Image: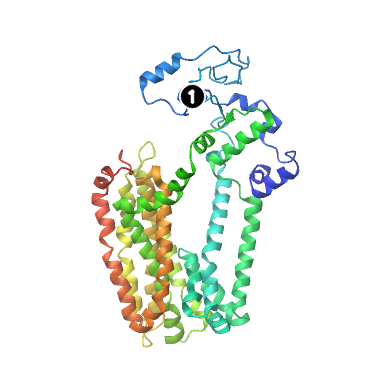
Amino acid sequence: MAELIRDTAFGHTVRFLSRGKLLPYPEDTDPDLWKKYVSEEKSGYAAYHGHTHAPPDEEQVEELANARGMRAAREDSETSSRTRVEGEEGYNAVSGVRVDAEKGKDVHVVDWYGRDDAQNPRNWSRPKKYFVTFEIVLLTFSVYIGSAIYTPGITDVVQVFDVAQVPATLGLTLVGAVCGPVLGPLVGGFAVMSKGWTWTIWELMWLSGFCWVVLFFFLPETSGPNILHRRAKRLRKLTGDEKLTCEPDMAAAEMTPRDIVLMTLVKPITLNFQEPIVFLLNLYIALIYGLLYVWFESFPLVFIEIYGFSLGLEGLAFLGILVGTLITAAVLFAWSFFYLEKQFDSNGNIEPEKRLIPAMVGCFFVPICLFWFGWSARSDIHWIVPIIGSSFFGVAAFTLFQAVLPYLSDAYPDSVASVLAGNDLMRSAFGAGFPLFASAMFKNLGINWASSTLAFLGIAFIPIPFALYKFGKQIRHKSKNARKDI
């Protein structure tokens, strides 16, 4: 338990207040521990040419091997693999390599404490990994459900504060995925009926507060680079050796403010419009995201005005989507286990296009759902029929998201953060824009033709996963940013 808490926000607070006496790290109790694992190889590369990776030229690698200078004595211990030693001036003390006057860096590169280092997230126990995953899911859920809890109170907000419908619905654009719209109205609807619209805010505060408490006390750092950064910082403080550093710190030191702006703001946008694969799939996912919030505007019109549901019962109508999502998740997980896992090679690689198979099925369920829902939402047809139709949106959204996002990650492994950031940008833009015209569209066109209009948009995008499944590899091989080795 102490190991779990030590890297949490609470653990860092305790260490700060106790000046490191409570919840100590291994190097706090064994000051010489780090000497066994300081990277001789990476320190040597840094001394030779300023980077922690091997030179690209084989002749340079051989030259580097011959360039190692005189070393001092190592500790005579069978358990010690590498020991920091004192070297003569001009040589890196850890590796014995002469420091190049132009390119070299005289640093001592801190690394993991062996392959089984307990602080490396890859070495966490299975229960710890499951628990951290649960915490991330809890955080995601508490964010996604936020506006959906709030939406049943929009009508009262409009009346109390005399604001227009469009500003009142802008809060809907702050969340994503399916779970919020599905469970939010169910939770918030009955609260509005019983206690008024303000109770939706109280519910959101309770959920967010509970989530904050859990994360503050029990969510550890999951970023390997940040763990190494903090380790190097602690070791510099413990030893007074300012040459101690780590690979993430060296990479960050080479970045200028311009590089940071380009990486975080410019690259996601440029990749989105320069790469055909990225643009088409981001546009498709953004469309699904936008359709989700446009279409959900019709639920009060259908189940309250046509079928006479109360505000609380109207929230139950969203459960059809939840059922469709859960069934699809079970099927997709089985497909991944019995088929997809067998497609990986011995190095853990898979041809990215094989990720798109679920999307080639799910793309048809977008128009099916919208046509079914739009033309069955009539007073002379039982209310269960449009609810059954709505379940197909869960099928479509889950399969498309689960296919497209892993595909983009596999196809652009070196730019995955920028690619997914661009995806999030487009989704947010569509999510912000589409609800602005949703209410007017359904009232002017009617439930049937408004839903059909959305369905036609879904039909227009059906060819995309099929085209990329067939031609995606060729497109990747012509790209400067995509993966080309598989």
- Compared to 182, does 256 lie above or below? above
* Colour pattern: rainbow
Position of 377 with respect to 110 (left or right) is left
Q: Residue at x 41, y 52 (%)?
A: 420
Foreground pick, 69 / 310: 69
- Compared to 114, does 174 lie above or below? below
Percent x, y of residue 484? 30, 40
Please identify the quarter of the rendering in which residue 358 is found: bottom left
Q: How many labels sit on residues?
A: 1
Q: Quadrant of the N terminus?
A: top right
Q: Residue at x 51, y 76 (%)?
A: 168
- Compared to 41, does 439 lie above or below? below
- Compared to 215, does 56 lie above or below? above
Judge whether residue 119 can be spotted in this image.
Answer: no
Percent x, y of residue 320? 43, 72
Please identify the quarter of the rendering in which residue 31 is found: top right
SS for dot 1: loop
Question: Which residue matches tag 1?
Answer: 104
Foreground pick, 198 / 366: 198
Q: Residue at x 34, y 46 (%)?
A: 411
Q: Residue at x 52, y 75 (%)?
A: 151
Foreground pick, 160 / 204: 160
Q: Quadrant of the C terminus?
A: top left
Position of 402 with respect to 222 (left or right) is left
Q: Give the class, few, some or many, for how many residues have Cα within 10 Å of label 1's Cα (few <14, many ≥20).
A: many
Percent x, y of residue 372? 33, 75
Judge whether residue 23 can be spotted in this image.
Answer: yes
Percent x, y of residue 175? 49, 65
Q: Tell me the kind of residue under disc 1.
A: Gly
